[in-house]
Image (cartoon, helix red, strand yellow):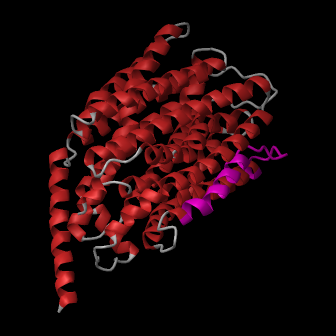
Amino acid sequence: MPSDLNQSLNLKTKLSYGIGELAGAIPNNILVFFLLFFLTNVAGLNSTFAGSVLLVGKAWDAINDPLIGWLSDKTRSPLGRRYPWMLYGAVPLGVCFCLQWFVPPTENQWLLFVYYSAIAILYYAAVSAVLVPFSTLGAELTQGYNERTKLISFKSAFGIGGSIFALVLAQVIFGFFQPPTSYLLLGGISGILSILAVFVCFLGTNQRYKFIQQQRHQIERPPAEPILQQIKIALSNRAFLYVIGIYLCSWLGVQVTAAILPYFVINWMQLPDKHFTQMALAVQGTALIMMFFWGAIGQRIDKKAIYCAGIPLTIVAQGGLFFVQPGQIIWMYVLAIMAGVGIATAYLVPWSMLPDVVDLDELNTGQRREGIFYGFVVQLQKFGVAGALFLVGRILDWSGFIPSVAFQPSPIQPDSALWAIRWIIGPIPTLVLIVGLILAYFYPITSSVHEEILLKISERNFEDESKNIQAIRH
């Protein structure tokens, strides 16, 4: 493999790739922090309908994400395989996200459910078109083990930074405007920023992408298999299954906490709305700061060791929140900061593991199928958000939670609903994160293993290139 594939990325490329993460980070964090609360307390949907809204699109998304990944692998255009999908999907992503926060002039539960479900389907189709190809760039801009950790550090830092920005933006807008106008304005601004992030990412990474692809295209590869065969091959990759499990546990645990957080702060802790955004900022701000710490540590130890060192802190913090009582505000914020230290590794590690899995697949099959692998993981990301909202919505509904409507007094919640809120923010995500921790411990690709993989790929490609040269001479 040409050494240029492993050379250090310049700051422009890393920043541009990181900015591209904002296209998903800003809207996705607003969705997970505010959508369920918006649907139950502003739009007036009952908890079951509200929690089911995003799951409606999952049946299609189960096909949609791997399909777009496969199609992007096969795409041939002057812009390459990934950028056409990103550029064409950017505007629909922004528009549909804005429409998710519009309240139709009806109180009919079924009509509201149909509207929000239809918008969710369109929104997630656009998300797939943008984020699946974007995510594959992490594997296509460099093949260096440590260089990928640096690149994913930028991606993760912008992901957390986008979350912090979204929360600050929401707090500012909510301070000047009342629901439902405030939510619609938040959706519109966030949609525009998402569109701009995609175009900045394209402009800043395109040169490096073209250079790497020119290097790789020097090696002739066997024809690609049909999509079902490629999916079967991907799922037979043991290391990939570990990454899937680690990522799903990390994302689901974090998103369940984010979805229940406003209910915990407002309904259990009996605090004003501002404490919800401040609590979220404490978690995400700490995670952003610790991202640089864990990224530096990642240059010295294996990726799974980082995860196993950080996630236990989040597990302890999640369990502690279950015992926090109304009035213990300082203790609540201390646990939020502790959780943020570990959450940084949940953002960083699974994404930095994935390119190494793609390299292992190339060694085993001779193909680079980034789109298939990243399609599965983006699918898990959306499933984590939708699954978290559905799970929280269903548990709240079973517990007797009483929804409210904008401009009306907030109802007094029964004890069963308050107990459910505490269980969702404490024991449930704690158990999920423990499973992810166990999977990370057994993850098989270490730094030395990855170096061996790249060496074998390089030797095989050198032999193939030599055979091609000899065939041309004869």
Image height check: is 451 above or below 364?
above
Residue 54 position in % (x across, y down): 59, 49
Point 57% across, 47% down: residue: 23
Residue 58 counted in the magenta span = no
Q: Quadrant of residue 307?
A: top left
Q: Nearer the viewer, residue 13 or 130?
A: 13
Q: Quadrant of residue 337?
A: top left
Q: Nearer the viewer, residue 201 or 395?
A: 201
Q: Is residue 429 left or right of residue 416?
A: left
Residue 372 position in % (x across, y down): 39, 63
**From which residue to which does the magenta span run?**
84-111
Outermost residue on the bottom side: it is 474
Q: Quadrant of residue 183?
A: top right
Q: Main secondary structure of the magenta part?
A: helix
Residue 26 position in % (x across, y down): 58, 40
Point 38% across, 77% down: residue: 226
Total numbered labels: 0
Image height check: is 334 above or below 155?
above
Q: Is residue 329 left or right of residue 274?
A: left
Point 46% across, 10% down: residue: 331
Point 79% across, 47% down: residue: 108
Residue 90 counted in the magenta span = yes
